[in-house]
Amino acid sequence: EAGVAQSPRYKIIEKRQSVAFWCNPISGHATLYWYQQILGQGPKLLIQFQNNGVVDDSQLPKDRFSAERLKGVDSTLKIQPAKLEDSAVYLCASRIEREQYFGPGTRLTVT
Amino acid sequence: GQNIDQPTEMTATEGAIVQINCTYQTSGFNGLFWYQQHAGEAPTFLSYNVLDGLEEKGRFSSFLSRSKGYSYLLLKELQMKDSASYLCAVDNYGQNFVFGPGTRLSVLP
């Protein structure tokens, strides 16, 4: 069974630029999460989808972050414009029943 | 509110036993997970507790006390490859996960 796929794996941008990340969950997993993990901290939930609907986006900085999962399968997370404090690893995870499965993450560096 | 607490760092010797504690205060509870995360990699599932008591899985065991809001992960016969961060996460009503800050474990020869 293929795991959660994410791209790109690494991205370096300057502040005020835009960036987009892509995630393809495990086939059949209805629930998809985006997390932000700052170095030395645990993952922080940004947004949770159930199929193509948003379940929880309470911690998503909506003035600059957006996410969509139009067909209920793959998802994109966008940051526009980026700030220095957005430097982090962005993890995508999908879930069926009780366990979450994580993708390899995208390491974003904002300079 | 939701709060999960873990020690920031721990050090242990190869072959020893180490216990990593996790305390939590969350608005909802539907189980507690432990994940292992090696540097630069994604978290991987270690264990799951929903009822009080000890769950054993090879060299790793996890304990839960729901009344005390407390869990621990016990690692036996430590190996160098066990050097990693260990994340405690509460399943919040089966909807989302709230992660603790993680405990960075260093295993020394």
Image (cartoon, coloured by chain):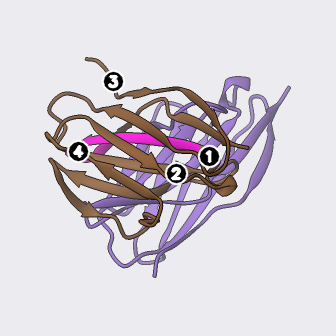
Chain colours: A brown, B purple
Q: Which residue is mark 3?
A: A3
Please identify the quarter of the rendering in which residue A20 is found.
Answer: top left
Identify the residue at the far bottom of this view.
Answer: B1
How many numbered discs, if any? 4
Q: Which residue is mark 4?
A: A69
Which SS class for mark 1? strand
Q: Mark 1 vs mark 4: which is more N-terminal?
A: 4
- Which numbered mark, 3 or 1, is in the foreground of this view? 1
Q: Which residue is mark 2?
A: A36
> Mark 4 and 2 residues: CB-CB less than 8 Å, in contact?
no
Report whether mark 1 lies on the same chain as mark 4. Answer: yes
Q: Mark 3 vs mark 1: which is more N-terminal?
A: 3
Q: Is B94 situated left or right of B32 in this image?
A: left
Of all chains, the one bearing label 3 is A
The prevailing secondary structure element of the residues shown in magenta is: strand
Of A6 and A29, which appears nearest the observer?
Answer: A6
Please, what is the three-letter code of the amino acid marked with disc 4? Arg
- Give the residue at x 57% y 62%: B22
- Magenta region, residue range: A89-100
Q: Mark 4 vs mark 2: which is more N-terminal?
A: 2
B1 up-or-down from B24: above or below: below
A92 up-or-down from B96: above or below: above
Identify the residue at the far top of this view.
Answer: A1
Q: Is B14 situated left or right of B48 in this image?
A: right
Q: CA distance from mark 4 to mark 3?
A: 18 Å
- Residue A95: x and y, percent? 26, 42
**Which image quadrant: the N terminus of chain B?**
bottom left
Determine which of the numbered discs, if any, sits on residue A88 in the image: 1
Q: Mark 4 vs mark 3: which is more N-terminal?
A: 3
Please, what is the three-letter code of the amino acid marked with disc 2? Gln
Q: Mark 2 vs mark 3: which is more N-terminal?
A: 3
